[in-house]
Image (cartoon, rainbow, N blue to C red):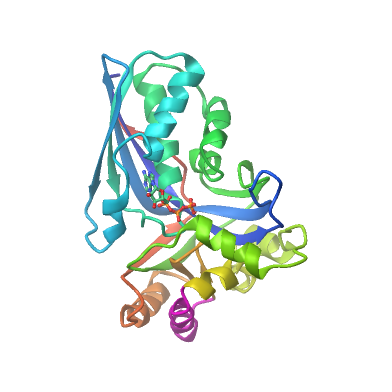
Amino acid sequence: MTTATVRVPAKINLCLGVGPVRGDGFHPLATVYQAVDLHDEVRASRRDDESITVAMHSELDVWAEAADVPEDEDNLAVRAARALQRATGTTTGVDLAIRKAIPVAGGMAGGSADAAAALVACNEVWGLGLSKHDLEPVAASLGSDVPFLLHGGNAVGGGRGETVSPVLARGRYHWVFATAAEGLSTAAVYARFDELSTDVPAPEIADGLLTALRAGDARALGEHLSNDLTEAALSLRPELEDTLDIGREAGAYGAILSGSGPTCLFLVEDEQHGLDVAIALGSASTCADVIQSTGPVPGARLVTG
Ligand code: ATP
């Protein structure tokens, strides 16, 4: 196969417990990931030489940040292809084309998603025959969220987020995402977290959240959504509190920031309930766009040859 297209979802964190910064600069995390139905697509075409190129395409004019995604060696998809080349001694290259729908710097791991997709696509066009399990070490070297995005579904994340294990869960959950016009830097939010936090305990996952997931109980899950980066992100972007309040007042079961923000997540009962919340959010001056979605969905997977 000389060309492969891979679809890859965005992630959300149903809970994001953050511990004190480690010696290596990373923070220990205790999180439950869910992959959601908002996808980027990465197309890989094999080259005869060793070069790796990337071209970005976005249908989403509102996300001005899409223009800031590097189209060189710094692109996370290129880094992923390069890392796989090195790890396997591959001497062929690849042209990557990314169709972006995941908000950039939105706390939904769009860059990590493209990295996971690039690993799966390059594995295919380079004929490496590796399983997702085999790709995990390379994925983990690229970023904390990359291993989860290979697999998708619901998973518990430990370490700095890179150690993932599936979680028992039932049901399909309906979400509304409110995106912001300007992204938030993950590094800046963690730096603020360190400034604001003293005596941070080791992070834990609340039993109530896992029980709600096992039962498929959206209302109970809504009550247990949590994010330890909230205070830090809101101190950098106070107007997000208004967005969260609008969704809560419109009856969402739960409202939190996605990862390091600024995307806000609202858990709702079903599509109709989501529409009510989406309409309320649509009038908020702090929202760039409102998206209805569901989860869990599978991770990076091949869609065409
Ligand atoms: P995190 O995974 O840290 O929560 P995020 O979801 O907030 O990150 P991303 O969309 O992954 O944010 O992008 C973070 C930064 O990574 C962007 O500002 C961009 O400059 C850079 N980047 C590099 N490659 C990509 C890519 N393929 N897609 C998106 N961003 C990329």
Q: Quadrant of the image for the C terminus?
A: top left
The number of callouts visible is 0
Residue 30, given in percent of the width and then of the height, sits at 68, 54
Q: As drawn, is 104 to the left or to the right of 20? A: left
Q: Camera-side residue: 107 or 265?
A: 107
Residue 202, given in percent of the width and then of the height, sits at 76, 57
* Relative vertical location of residue 256 with respect to residue 276 in this rendering, above or below: above
Residue 264, given in percent of the width and then of the height, sits at 45, 69
Residue 8, given in percent of the width and then of the height, sits at 40, 43
Q: Which residue sits furthest bottom?
A: 249
* Relative vertical location of residue 250 with respect to residue 231 in this rendering, above or below: below
Q: As drawn, is 91 to the left or to the right of 214? A: left
Q: As drawn, is 122 to the left or to the right of 241? A: left
On the question of residue 11 being in view, the answer is yes
* Relative vertical location of residue 154 with respect to residue 220 in this rendering, above or below: above
At 49% from the left and 78% from the top, the residue drawn is: 252
In the image, residue 82 lies in the stretch drawn in magenta? no
Q: Camera-side residue: 23 or 241?
A: 23
Q: Camera-side residue: 178 or 220?
A: 178
Which image quadrant is residue 227 in?
bottom right
Q: Quadrant of the image for the N terminus?
A: top left
* Relative vertical location of residue 116 with respect to residue 86 in this rendering, above or below: below
On the question of residue 218 being in view, the answer is no
Q: As drawn, is 203 to the left or to the right of 272? A: right
At 43% from the left and 38% from the top, the residue drawn is: 115
At 77% from the left and 62% from the top, the residue drawn is: 201
Residue stretch in magenta: 237-253
At 53% from the left and 41% from the top, the residue drawn is: 143
In the image, residue 249 lies in the stretch drawn in magenta? yes
